[in-house]
Image (tube, rainbow, N blue to C red):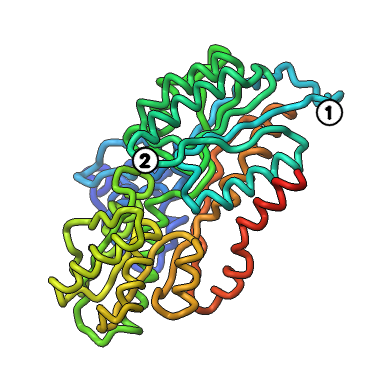
Amino acid sequence: MAIDRQELRENGAFSIELGVSRRKLIKQLGALGAASGLAGCSGLLQGGGTTGGGGQSGGGNDSGGGNQSSGGSTGGQPLQDFEFSRIPMVPPPTAPIDNANPDTGVERRAEFVIQNVANPFFTPLIAGFNDALNQFGWNGGVNGPSGGTQSQSQQIEIINTTIDQLQGGRDVLVTTILDGQAYIDPIQRALDNDIAVINGHSTPAEEDWNNDIMRENFTYKDSNMIVPHVGIRDTRGGVAMAAEAYDRMGSKLDADQYTVLFGNGLPGNPAVTRRVDPGAREFLATKDDVTMIEETLDVTTEFGEAQSRVESRLSTNQDINVVLGAGFWTAVGASQAVESGNVSRDLVIGGFDLTEAVLTSIRDGSIDFTMGQDPYGQGFLNVPLAWMYLERGIEMKHLEFGVTFIDESNVEYALQRNVWSELRDWQEQNL
């Protein structure tokens, strides 16, 4: 890059020649005191446009956590936005910590309150939590309502009852959080009672739950408090599902255009819903050969009803050749429609989670793939996170991870491992 310094000073412009490294360009601009001009030049060198800084987003969800810094513009070109996450160092209920003389004799208890203990998805989560309690020598278990329309209010009632049973300065509350407002009071009450709190598995909509929102609502020991999240980032999981589905459209379907039907068995669950909207929809919206049915079909959590509703849509719209689910009910419903013979055309079918019905359908060829979110890890990892906080004074941080891909190539191993009910039986008899 050849820079005429006098021209730059007078006109605020310069010419660009090929063969100059980005590092040398930045050095030259810095010498001129023209760092603010990097926005437009950076966009040109990177292929145009500005992008996020690519840092870790905050808050246990898929937003930027409210910690973004945006810097105006220069010469009509916007500066980059930078994402970052800050976790405050807040002393634990066990402070002061003496790591030179650790107290190994404290009996601790951790209770995990989930929104639906009857959902088979949570069986490996319960098993993982119990394994961790056993490994760390803690007491506790998993509790929650058995589903239904009042499950959230029932869950919050159980949370409050659990708080009354836990001992401040010693114990831990883990819970799934489905709503950004309804859970604030019980979580703050737990913190006020010197109980450590973790958000396991699920988060509400990102606009209701990020690091800034938590700082505004939660305090502990006169400090702002972040409640860490353990689990996947659902929007990114939905993108992963859509990317895999798109690859399979080209390899499996003899079509120039693809029409996608989305289904959701839990339309009121914000975490599950984010996998489709914005997740999968945003990815597929970039593909010129994909049309998406605007409405996401509520398939319910009954496999028979899911089959009936998917079959009805497939019969009224013969263009649909891809069925994707935010959870596992849509994929199972679509697979049953294929297995029954009521739907005879080729379909790409995919969804989420590793329930028995999904895995057996993949093995039998009626579901193409599914994305696993590691519910076992979503149960287990809460305990070591809390142990480090209470025993060593290390502030708790978000443990967010990607999704696992299962298709015909690895489904046999997934089935062999998927004996969580048997593990639960063993735990009840031995732990």
Residue at the right extreme? 101
Question: Residue at 60% across / 21% down in the picture?
Answer: 195
- The three-letter amino acid code for the residue at tag 2 is Gly
Foreground pick, 145 / 252: 145
Using the image, tell me which numbered label, if any, was put on residue 148.
2
Q: Dot 1: what SS?
A: loop
Q: Looking at the figure, which quarter contains the N terminus? A: bottom left
Q: Position of residue 19 (x, y in %)?
A: 40, 68
State which mark lies toward you, 2 or 1: 2
Question: Is residue 261 depicted above or below 173 in this figure?
Answer: below
Task: Find disc 1 in the rendering and name its residue.
Answer: 104
- Decide which of tag 2 and tag 1 comes sooner along the chain: 1
- The three-letter amino acid code for the residue at tag 1 is Thr
Question: Is residue 336 depicted above or below 241 in this figure?
Answer: below
Question: Residue at 59% across / 63% down in the picture?
Answer: 418
Quarter of the rendering containing residue 318: bottom left
Quarter of the rendering containing residue 285: bottom left
Foreground pick, 357 / 215: 357
Q: Can residue 286 be seen in the rendering of this structure?
A: no
Question: Is residue 155 depicted above or below 256 in this figure?
Answer: above
Q: Is residue 136 left or right of residue 11?
A: right
Q: Position of residue 215 (x, y in %)?
A: 44, 23
Residue at the left extreme? 316
Q: Position of residue 8 (x, y in %)?
A: 27, 47
Q: Residues within 10 Å of mark 1 (few under 14, many from 20)?
A: few
Q: Is residue 90 left or right of residue 391?
A: left
Q: Is residue 256 left or right of residue 81?
A: left
Question: Residue at 70% across / 46% down in the picture?
Answer: 428
Q: Is residue 339 left or right of residue 146?
A: left
Q: Looking at the figure, which quarter contains the C terminus? A: top right
